[in-house]
């Protein structure tokens, strides 16, 4: 992590900590904490898709496993949700390792297709799960609810418990800081891995798998590592999401959420440490903004939204951070603080020197 | 150079590689001794690249065995073969395009040798030193910050060589290092390879530019349709009727003889 | 025995509809590795074009249908020029265009939702209410129309690909873009035409689909998934295989629906396709070498 990155991060965290005390309306706090949750997922997804270059869309399935683990354990085993988080994380790692194994020798869109199929499978299995479950009868004999709750979803499994500690008015602040904590961990993990030796291995595999293997990188090992590592916090984010909203349904496996997360990822910039954060922030502000401006604008919002995702992919595939990065380097070079990173620029600069 | 009493560094026994009905490598049987430079020549499609694909684990052999330093590596993947001390370059300019030149070499240094059992987060000082050494050997120490995608052709070839060297190979396989370069650039690469030979690295070198091949090699293998049609000293090559017929042609052979004579003087 | 007949009748109908949507999808991938996630939205769009020309413009159905197909072809051309055209030479084309077309698909679908509202329309181009009996199993005339349409179009596409110069150019480009280019094929024109053709096929399948059920802005989602399943089973880019796989999937789905239960049809083929992707990613009829490019 460079000094520049560290300074920006500290400033951002300080701002995020102060945010609830800046007189913002409560619904904005909720938007912000949902953004933190999704941003966490995106920081981890970026490790798989952006850094290791594996086009997996299975992140949603891992998120959902986390959410459902918390719901099921909280409901049927009467576990405090705080204790379910690590279990949810491990469940996510387990699923992700399976996906990693299944996609080991696949490339590009094949991975995407398989992972879509797996997420869709989970969605359909939950939706078709309609038989009254015995477990549920033990808890609540009057109702007929299936094990996963089917298309209705599950509720009644506990929450973070901030209401009891902080009181009803400040409970949302508790939720806010909890999610913020998760995001900070997610960002630190992602920065650390991207700049580490393992991260270099991921990037090498992304850029040229065959050459990477010839230089001693085991695709088997590193693919499983990236799937495993990125899954833990993703699943915990899912389980935080469930705990915050005190309900989960198969909707979290749907296309809408997938598109939202993809948008954060690609608008921010794939494979770059700052991409997920910037993307999550920009997309959230965009959505909040449109909702405020156009009262009847829900559908127009999605038209524009889809258009933005397409436009970024088509004209700016490196995303906002990619573009900003170029700009930043250009300025540094112009000001004489850095060396040009492309030889053509160097050549031009040398020509200039020669002419001077 | 190759004395029979020394143990071979690389030993290939009855090596075959089939693509459907095509035998791209057809019963190659060869030993390479420490300090050798084995030059491989032969027409396009002769199976030279496939041969080193097989020994470097990129493409598994159909039958036959390969051993490195007395250790059977026939069924090893490319990563484990690299850890055992064999590194290669590619005919096309392969690189980690989005990474800097330095990071490209660092990949070789960080993953190519030593204990790779449990992946680690940090680099050692020794790795960094190896990166500097490899960059210096190919003369790119001042260009480490450039993005690999954007360096010119010669530099891409040298970069590939540097990242191979950074893995500390005992045996280096080089596939057509000077294809598409100017004569001046070819001489530059030749100097670098001479430097490597001085370091004691054993080399297998595929090249079409015969002048280059004959001047560097201590032994030569000529392939045709996957088979070996000549194996022996470089100075005997031009006397071999079959090689001249199927590969070099009378004119080229004559020019090369002249060149070799000059070199001898 | 009636079970059997029921499975055949509904399985063949499903298969015919899947083949119409899947063949276009497969053709586009086979030609230039574009996995068109907007294919489902174009199906829907095509079906709505019939409504537009018939209801709003007051055309007769015999005119509205061909007009709808022409509009779909234009939509395909536009899709090419707003997406693939700019991306062909850039890195990671296959993944980037997949994401881009997801975005376009969402924009298109919500646009339709905005324009037509969420309520279902009845597809005017339908013979669903007329039927005849075979062994106590009712068979609507609409099914006959679907079978005939699928048959005619598939044979038509087959002839087009194998007998015409343009079809040969398409296949040459699919096999080797660079070589085709060297032989004088203008590959970008081929891509535009393939996308236009695929969009027409999509529109036909959208019209057929809505003629059996109803017309809704989001109706393209599920058939798109099914079309993907079909082309995965066939092996991406294997156009003739897609035809067989479509019928296989239709029959399998109908069989599970009739024998096990309606809600298990889709999960059954999903499991099937996941297993095929893992064990035989080149598809059921695929050659190994074309896989996992
Ligand atoms: N992956 C492959 N599949 C099928 N045939 C191949 C493959 N790789 C190489 N070949 C064939 O094997 C033969 C040898 O190729 P190659 O080793 O590249 O020759 P060289 O390097 O000597 O020019 C050629 O006929 C080539 O077409
Ligand atoms: Mg070759």
Image (cartoon, coloured by chain):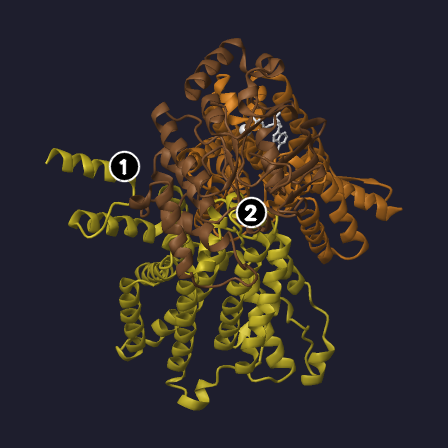
Chain colours: A yellow, B brown, C orange
Estimate the spatial distance between the alpha carbons at disc 1 and disc 2, rounded to whole Å.
59 Å
Q: Residue at 44% x, 55% y: name it.
A: A200
Q: Chain of mark 2?
A: C
Q: Residue at 72% x, 44% y: name it.
A: C249
Query: Is residue A354 rendered to the left or right of residue C41?
Result: left
Q: Which x, y percent locates residue A102?
A: 64, 54
**Which residue carries the number 1 mark?**
A344
Does residue C232 appear in this view? yes
Q: Quarter of the image containing the C terminus of chain A?
A: top left
Q: How many marks?
A: 2
- Residue at disc 2, secondary structure: loop
- Residue at disc 1, secondary structure: helix
Q: Tell me, for residue C121, which label it has, or none.
A: 2
Looking at the picture, tell me which residue is in the foreground, A168 or C189. Answer: C189
Q: Which x, y percent locates residue A129?
A: 69, 66
Q: Residue at 33% x, 42% y: name it.
A: B140
Q: Which x, y percent locates residue C160?
A: 61, 21
């Amino acid at each position: 992590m460079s000094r520049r990155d560290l300074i920006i991060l500290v400033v951002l965290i300080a701002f995020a900590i102060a945010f609830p005390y800046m007189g913002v309306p409560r619904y904005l706090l909720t938007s912000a904490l949902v953004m933190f949750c999704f941003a966490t997922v995106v920081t981890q997804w970026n490790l798989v898709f952006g850094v290791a270059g594996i086009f997996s869309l299975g992140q949603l399935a891992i998120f959902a496993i986390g959410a459902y683990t918390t719901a099921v354990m909280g409901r049927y085993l009467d576990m405090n949700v705080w204790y379910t988080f690590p279990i949810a994380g491990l469940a996510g790692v387990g699923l992700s390792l399976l996906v990693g194994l299944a996609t080991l020798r696949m490339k590009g869109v094949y991975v995407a297709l398989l992972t879509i199929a797996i997420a869709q499978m989970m969605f359909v299995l939950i939706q078709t799960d309609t038989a009254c479950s015995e477990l549920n009868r033990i808890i609540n004999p009057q109702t007929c609810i299936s094990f996963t709750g089917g298309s209705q979803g599950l509720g009644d499994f506990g929450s973070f418990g901030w209401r009891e500690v902080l009181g009803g008015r400040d409970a949302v602040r508790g939720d806010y800081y909890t999610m913020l904590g998760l995001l900070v961990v997610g960002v630190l993990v992602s920065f650390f891995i991207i700049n580490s030796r393992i991260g270099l291995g991921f990037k090498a595999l992304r850029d040229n798998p065959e050459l990477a293997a010839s230089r001693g990188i085991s695709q088997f090992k590193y693919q499983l590592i990236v799937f495993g590592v990125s899954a833990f916090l993703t699943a915990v984010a899912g389980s935080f999401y469930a705990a915050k909203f005190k309900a989960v349904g198969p909707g979290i496996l749907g296309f809408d959420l997938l598109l939202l997360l993809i948008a954060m990822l690609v608008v921010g910039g794939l494979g770059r440490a700052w991409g997920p954060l910037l993307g999550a922030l920009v997309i959230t502000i965009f959505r909040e903004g449109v909702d405020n401006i156009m009262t009847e604008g829900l559908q127009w919002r999605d038209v524009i939204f889809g258009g933005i995702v397409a436009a970024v992919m088509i004209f700016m595939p490196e995303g906002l951070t990619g573009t900003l990065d170029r700009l930043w380097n250009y300025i540094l070079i112009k000001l004489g603080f850095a060396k040009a990173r492309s030889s053509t620029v160097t050549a031009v600069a040398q020509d200039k020197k020669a002419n001077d | 150079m190759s004395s029979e009493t020394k143990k071979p560094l690389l030993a290939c026994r009855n090596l075959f590689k089939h693509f459907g009905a095509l035998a791209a490598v057809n019963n190659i049987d060869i030993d390479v001794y420490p300090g050798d430079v084995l030059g491989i020549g032969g027409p396009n499609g002769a199976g030279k690249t496939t041969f080193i694909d097989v020994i470097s684990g990129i493409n598994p052999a159909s039958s036959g065995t390969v051993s490195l330093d007395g250790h059977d590596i026939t069924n090893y993947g490319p990563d484990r073969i690299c850890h055992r001390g064999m590194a290669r370059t590619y005919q096309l300019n392969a690189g980690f395009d989005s990474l800097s030149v330095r990071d490209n070499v660092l990949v070789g240094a960080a993953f190519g040798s030593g204990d790779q059992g449990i992946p680690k987060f940090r680099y050692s000082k020794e790795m960094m030193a190896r990166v500097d050494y490899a960059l210096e050997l190919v003369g790119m120490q001042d260009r480490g910050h450039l993005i690999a995608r954007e360096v010119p052709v010669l530099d891409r070839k040298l970069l590939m060589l540097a990242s191979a060297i950074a893995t500390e190979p005992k045996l280096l396989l080089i596939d057509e290092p000077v294809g598409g370069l100017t004569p001046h650039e070819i001489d530059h690469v030749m100097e670098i390879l001479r430097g490597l030979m001085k370091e004691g690295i054993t080399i297998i070198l595929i090249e079409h530019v015969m002048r280059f091949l004959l001047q560097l090699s201590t032994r030569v293998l000529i392939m045709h349709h996957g088979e070996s049609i000549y194996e022996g000293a470089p100075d005997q090559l031009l006397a071999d009727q079959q090689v001249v017929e199927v590969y070099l042609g009378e004119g080229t052979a004559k020019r090369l003889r002249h060149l070799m004579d000059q070199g001898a003087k | 025995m009636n079970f059997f007949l029921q499975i055949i009748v509904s399985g063949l109908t499903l298969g015919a509809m899947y083949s119409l949507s899947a063949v276009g999808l497969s053709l586009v991938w086979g030609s230039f590795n574009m996995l068109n996630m907007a294919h489902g939205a174009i199906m829907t769009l095509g079906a709505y074009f019939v409504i537009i020309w018939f209801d709003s413009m007051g055309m007769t159905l015999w005119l509205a249908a061909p007009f709808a197909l022409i509009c779909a072809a234009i939509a395909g051309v536009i899709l090419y020029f707003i997406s693939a055209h700019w991306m062909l030479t850039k890195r990671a084309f296959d993944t980037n265009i997949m994401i881009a077309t997801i975005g376009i698909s969402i924009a298109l679908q919500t646009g339709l939702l905005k324009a037509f509202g969420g309520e279902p329309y009845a597809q005017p181009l339908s013979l669903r209410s007329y039927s005849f009996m075979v062994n106590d199993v009712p068979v609507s005339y609409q099914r006959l129309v679907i079978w005939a349409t699928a048959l005619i179009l598939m044979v038509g596409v087959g002839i087009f690909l194998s007998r015409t110069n343009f079809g040969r150019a398409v296949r040459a480009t699919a096999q080797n873009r660079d070589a085709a280019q060297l032989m004088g094929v203008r590959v970008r024109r081929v891509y535009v035409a393939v996308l236009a053709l695929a969009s027409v096929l999509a529109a036909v399948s959208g019209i057929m689909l809505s003629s059996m059920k109803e017309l809704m802005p989001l109706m393209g989602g599920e058939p798109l998934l099914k079309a993907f399943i079909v082309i995965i089973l066939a092996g991406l880019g294997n156009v003739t295989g897609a035809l067989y796989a479509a019928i296989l999937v239709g029959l399998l789905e109908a069989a599970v629906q009739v024998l096990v239960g309606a809600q298990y049809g889709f999960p059954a083929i999903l499991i099937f396709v996941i297993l095929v992707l893992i064990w035989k990613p080149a598809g059921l009829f695929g050659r190994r070498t074309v896989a996992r490019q």
